[in-house]
Image (cartoon, grey):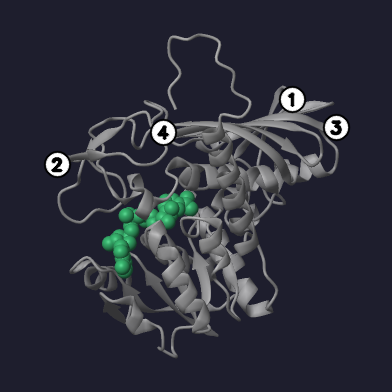
């Protein structure tokens, strides 16, 4: 059985989704083989060269042309955040299944606006790491006792230098809430996935590099800026204190300007009988109390990739797992993995953090000298 797919936005994530479509049947032979029907990108030539490189049957610069194509059953929305709502609403209303990247728009309202008869899978990929699945199972079975508190950190350096370009990510109208939507949405999703619902937040945020140079020409991913200087409009950093439904306390920090600390995503979770810690940069390992344990067959989806514990998996493998959840949702009609409700809830919590930070609630001035918003 084949399933016709289209990819909208052929930057970093568009390429990752496309590679996942190419591999998903190899790892999950019971699932349909995605057929690459069309790719859309508005940068001249980008969709056409992607079609040639990856084997899409057609390429277009205007994604609207794909809305009524009956050969397309599923669509990856991998364009910048400000386009998620318009694209998501249109494709969902046209009856297409959606694999849409986080944060799903600029706000919870954007994510809520997307409704249709199809399945929706959201790109919260860190859930899928087999070591994270193992951590969830160890928590569920009481291995570390009752969780008392935890620390989640999603810090990276992709914008640590003022020379890193002012792209759509740094504009409020196109990128939304900066590092909150970008990395904070992953952190919030992982907290909820592992530890349960968040019920109260307080937070602080900052724009730490207020000006950058614009990128010259079309952008993709992260790059240097050599154009005119312009203002950074959204958050580079935030830290939040969270209370969970369980009563556990969590600190959550994210940064895009953590110099020298690329992709430092992970957590330490403390329970009454031990701790669990995970670092994305050593994705297959989990610290359980004072021991290192390795993810292996039996942990999450590990067995679909490798036959023995401690054989390294990759970031792209997480997206293959996500593609399998998307396809399985379509085949069974039963949602699997992170969906729209998770994106809406993450966005609501991030909005609560922004509101708490701007209200200054829980903040006490202890020196007159300096306290900047
Ligand atoms: P990017 O800038 O590399 O790519 C975006 C692409 O969309 C570009 O090729 C651009 O030309 C194209 N585009 C822009 N306007 C378009 C339009 N009107 N029609 C068609 N294409 C258009 O960005 P990226 O890093 O790939 O991020 C894209 C999305 O993926 C963002 O929402 C981001 O938050 C998300 N993302 C998720 C993860 C993850 O770990 N899940 C990682 C990176 C990015």
Rendered-image quadrant of the C terminus:
top left
The residue pinned by badge 4 equals 262
On screen, residue 202 above or below 333: above
**Which image quadrant for residue 227?**
top left
Q: Residue 289 carries which label?
A: 1
- At 58% from the left and 74% from the top, the residue drawn is 115
Q: What element carries label 2?
A: loop
Dot 3 or dot 4: first in sequence order is 3
Q: Position of residue 91 (x, y in %)?
A: 47, 78
The residue pinned by badge 2 equals 228
Q: Distance between the residues labelled 4 and 1?
A: 26 Å
Please indicate whether residue 330 sits to the left or right of residue 78 in the image. Answer: right
- At 55% from the left and 15% from the top, the residue drawn is 365
Find out whether the residues at labels 4 and 1 contact each other: C-beta distance under 8 Å. Answer: no
Q: Position of residue 350 (x, y in %)?
A: 56, 45
Dot 4 or dot 1: first in sequence order is 4
Q: What element carries label 4?
A: loop
């Amino acid at each position: 059985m084949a399933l016709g797919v289209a990819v909208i936005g052929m930057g970093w994530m568009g390429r990752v989704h496309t590679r996942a479509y190419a591999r998903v049947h190899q790892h999950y032979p019971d699932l349909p083989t995605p057929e690459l029907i069309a790719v859309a990108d508005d940068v001249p030539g980008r969709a056409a060269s992607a079609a040639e490189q990856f084997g899409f049957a057609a390429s277009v610069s205007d994604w609207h042309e794909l809305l009524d194509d009956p050969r397309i059953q599923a669509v990856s929305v991998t364009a910048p955040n400000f386009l998620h709502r318009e694209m998501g609403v249109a494709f969902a209303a046209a009856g297409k299944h959606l694999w849409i990247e986080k944060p799903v728009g600029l706000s919870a309202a954007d994510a809520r606006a997307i409704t249709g008869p199809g399945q929706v899978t959201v790109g919260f990929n860190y859930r899928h790491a087999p070591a994270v699945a193992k951590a969830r199972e160890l928590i569920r079975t009481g291995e570390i006792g009752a969780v008392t508190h935890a620390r989640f950190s999603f810090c990276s350096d992709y914008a640590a230098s003022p020379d890193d370009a002012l792209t759509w990510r740094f504009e409020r109208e196109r990128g939304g809430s900066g590092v909150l939507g970008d990395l904070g949405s992953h952190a919030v999703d992982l907290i909820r996935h592992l530890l349960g619902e968040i019920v109260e937040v307080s937070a602080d945020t900052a724009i730490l590099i207020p000006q950058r140079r614009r990128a010259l020409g079309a952008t993709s991913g992260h790059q240097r800026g050599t154009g005119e200087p312009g203002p950074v409009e959204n958050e580079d950093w935030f830290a939040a204190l969270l209370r969970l439904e369980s009563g556990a306390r969590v600190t959550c920090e994210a940064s895009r300007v953590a110099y020298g600390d690329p992709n430092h995503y992970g957590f330490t979770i403390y329970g009454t009988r031990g701790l669990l810690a995970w670092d994305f940069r050593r994705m297959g390992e989990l610290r359980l109390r004072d021991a290192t344990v390795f993810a292996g067959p039996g942990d999450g989806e590990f067995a679909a990739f490798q036959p023995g514990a401690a054989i390294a998996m990759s970031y792209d493998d997480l997206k293959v797992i996500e593609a399998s959840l998307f396809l399985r949702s379509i085949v069974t009609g039963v949602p699997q993995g992170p969906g729209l409700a998770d994106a809406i809830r993450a966005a609501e919590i991030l909005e609560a953090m922004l509101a708490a930070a701007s209200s200054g609630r829980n903040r006490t001035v202890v020196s007159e000298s300096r306290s900047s918003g």
